[in-house]
Image (tube, rainbow, N blue to C red):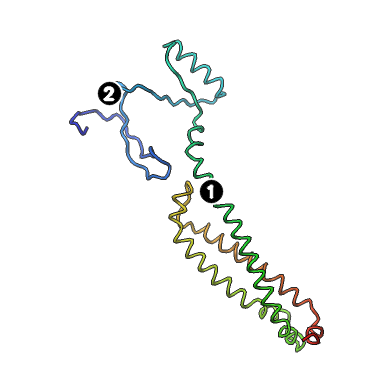
Amino acid sequence: MRDGTRIQVVGIAEDGKYESLTEDPKPVMFLSILQSPSTSTQLVVRSSRDPQLLASAMRSALRKLDAGLPVLIEARDKPMDTLLFGPRMATVSLGVLGVMGAMLSITGIFGIAAYSVSKRLKELGIRIALGAQRREVLAAALGRAVKLLAIGSAAGLLLGILASKVLAFIVYEATPRDPLVLAGVVLAMLLLGLVATWIPAQRALGVDPLILLREE
């Protein structure tokens, strides 16, 4: 020991977390209560019985040993609920903010696509009147929006990687730079953006080009 006391090692336990859930696992030494007396003792009991019945039996057995012994019995999950309250609230808050951000992004993309298509209705009408295929008109209408989506997705992916360490610190068991999560978010936003741009383009294709040219 640090004070020079020599003790016999009777077993080895793996590293664990003892101060917070976000700390790295570290080694710890367990001493017998005879070697390190304490005013409080914790017993961990594992059983398949009903927790209420088990608590009553444990309390009865301890009272037989010492009727004046103060006893506190609680389920293993109760302290964990207290420790996980902060990370859970942070996860819910981030989820709500993420949904709101996605809705704002979709609204912005839809608005930009609708405005862009409305400004190019004459051009699209001329293309259709000259015999352009539906696929070519869609490509012309969606080209700028798809380019913006690609640039935005790349920027979002880069910012997500940079913010991964902060996310891992806030959210319990969040893995920094999780490729599945990053790829899933990027693909989801790309698909939502394509749907938001597809609707105005489909509306433009449904308009008679003669009417467009006559209005212009």
Question: In the rendering, at what x and y percent does residue 95 appear?
Answer: 57, 52
In the image, residue 33 above or below residue 192: above
Mark 1 vs mark 2, foreground winner is: 1
Q: Which residue appears at 48% of the width and 26% of the height?
A: 46
The answer to which of marks 1 and 2 sits earlier in the sequence is 2
Task: Give the residue at the far bottom of this rendering.
Answer: 130
Q: Which residue appears at 48% of the width and 63% of the height?
A: 159
Task: Name the amino acid, label 1.
Answer: Thr
Callout 1: helix, strand or loop?
helix
Quarter of the picture containing the C terminus is bottom right
Front in this rendered view, residue 159 or 191: 159
Question: In the rendering, at what x and y percent does residue 111 appear?
Answer: 67, 70
Q: Which residue is mark 1?
A: 91
Question: In the rendering, at what x and y percent does residue 91 appear?
Answer: 53, 48
Image quadrant of residue 117? Answer: bottom right
Task: Name the amino acid, label 2.
Answer: Gln
Question: In the rendering, at what x and y percent does residue 102 appear?
Answer: 61, 60
On residue 39, the disc is none
Q: Which residue appears at 61% of the width and 56% of the height?
A: 99
Q: Which residue is mark 2?
A: 35
- Relative placement, left or right, of 155 versus 202 is left
Task: Give the residue at the far left of this rendering.
Answer: 4
